[in-house]
Image: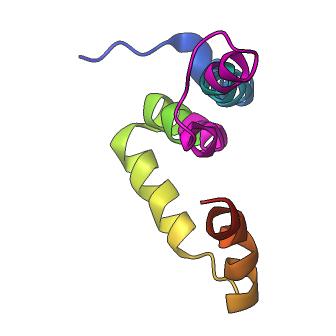
């Protein structure tokens, strides 16, 4: 039997915020340190930091609802439809900066 952290099921929004911000800032810390000359980081790493909210959503959903919740989340993501112009806006930073 899998033991899940009880506080995540009791406070899913707080858990999401902590995980999303935590992931983003931990990854971004490498870029910040490199910018200040305290090390080096690959140029593409700042793109990974942007996935903090996605990581938070999937982590909290997996812990709170299990694989059935993750499947529902993926199904809901598949229902989102965007016009081609919006896709251009979403991917333009990758095209321009990549």
| Residue farthest toward the left in the current orientation of the protein | 1
Examine the image and state in which quarter residue 54 appears: top right
Residue 89 on image: x %, y %: 76, 75
| Viewer-proximal residue among 20 and 36 | 36
**36 on left or right of 2:** right
Residue 11 on image: x %, y %: 69, 21
Q: Quadrant of the N terminus?
A: top left
Q: Is residue 92 magenta?
A: no
User: What segment carries the magenta color?
Assistant: 30-56
Q: Quadrant of the C terminus?
A: bottom right
Examine the image and state in which quarter residue 84 appears: bottom right
- Count of numbered tags: 0
Give me the residue at 60% from left, 26% from top.
27
Examine the image and state in which quarter residue 4 appears: top left
| Residue farthest toward the front in the current orientation of the protein | 37
Give me the residue at 60% from left, 46% from top.
47
Colour theme? rainbow
Residue 26 on image: x %, y %: 62, 19
Q: Is residue 33 magenta?
A: yes
Give me the residue at 37% from left, 48% from top.
68
Answer above or below: position of 76 versus 45: below
Residue 30 on image: x %, y %: 61, 20
| Viewer-proximal residue among 36 and 10 | 36
**14 on left or right of 45:** right
Give me the residue at 69% from left, 67% from top.
96
């Amino acid at each position: 039997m899998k033991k899940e952290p009880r506080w995540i099921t009791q406070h899913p929004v707080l858990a999401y915020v902590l995980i999303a911000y935590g992931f983003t800032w931990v990854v971004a810390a490498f870029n910040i340190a490199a910018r200040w000359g305290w090390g080096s980081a690959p140029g593409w790493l700042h793109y990974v930091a942007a996935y903090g909210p996605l990581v938070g959503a999937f982590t909290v959903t997996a812990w709170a609802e299990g694989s059935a919740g993750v499947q529902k989340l993926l199904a809901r993501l598949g229902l989102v439809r965007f016009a081609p112009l919006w896709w251009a806006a979403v991917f333009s930073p990758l095209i321009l900066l990549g």
